Amino acid sequence: MSIRCKTGQQLNFLSLRRVVCETEFFICISLPKQFTFRKSERLKSRKALDALFQSGRRFTQQPFRVFYAIKNTPGLQFGVSVSNKNFKKAVDRNKIKRLVREAYRLQKNELQEVLEQQKKGMHLFLVYIQQDIADYPVFYKSVKKILITLIKNLREDHS
């Protein structure tokens, strides 16, 4: 959101602020980034998952195996899986998935912005491959590295 002052100066705002332009006071409100994970952003389609595993790109960033495919239709869809071979109890599998989704939800905005600029979309799927349950900071750092790698790959493909 931006406002033009009497002096012609363009003012941009990222959050609620009081700005002084000569003797005038403005209170400007802009919408914060949305840290949501809607149903439409979940990767659940069997057809899309099969295509992703067969023809998508992949790499490993501990403790995850990352599968992704860039598509021409806009939108970012995400999914996560935990093997019941490694974690017999559903409680443990659900805890890992919950923590990974939360780490993704808080950091996905930069990837979404790059995809919107390039008018592309992406299917992203993480498979947890470690044998024990990691703490949330490990998930957060790992998801951050994954998203940085994906953004770098997108920019390389685009240029």
Image: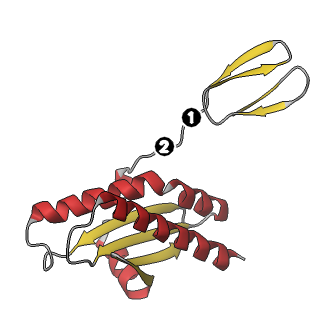
For residue 135, above or below residue 88: above
Residue 19 falls left or right of residue 148: right
| Residue 4: quadrant of the picture | top right
Q: Amino acid at mark 2?
A: Gln
Q: Amino acid at mark 1?
A: Leu
Quadrant containing the C terminus in the rendered view: bottom right
Q: Position of residue 11 (x, y in %)?
A: 78, 31
Tag 1 and tag 2, C-beta contact below 8 Å? yes
- Name the residue located 41 percent from the left edge and 68 percent from the top edge: 142
The vertical placement of 9 against 27, above or below, is below
Q: Quadrant of residue 15?
A: top right
Question: How far across and how far down the image is residue 40, in percent?
Answer: 38, 54
Give the residue displayed 78% in from the left and 20% down from the top: 20
Q: In the picture shown, does residue 24 fall above or below 82?
A: above
Which quadrant would the N terminus be assigned to in this image? Answer: top right
Q: Residue furthest left?
A: 89
The residue under the point 64% across, 36% down is 14
Give x and y (percent) for residue 68: 45, 76
Location of residue 61 by image quarter: bottom left
Numbered circle sitting on residue 34? 2
Query: Which SS class for mark 2?
Result: loop
Q: Which mark is residue 31?
A: 1
Is 121 situated left or right of 56 in this image? right
10 Å crowding of disc 2: few (<14), some (14-19), many (20+): few
Residue 56 can be seen, yes or no: no
Q: Is residue 17 visible?
A: yes
Q: Residue at x 48, y 43 (%)?
A: 34
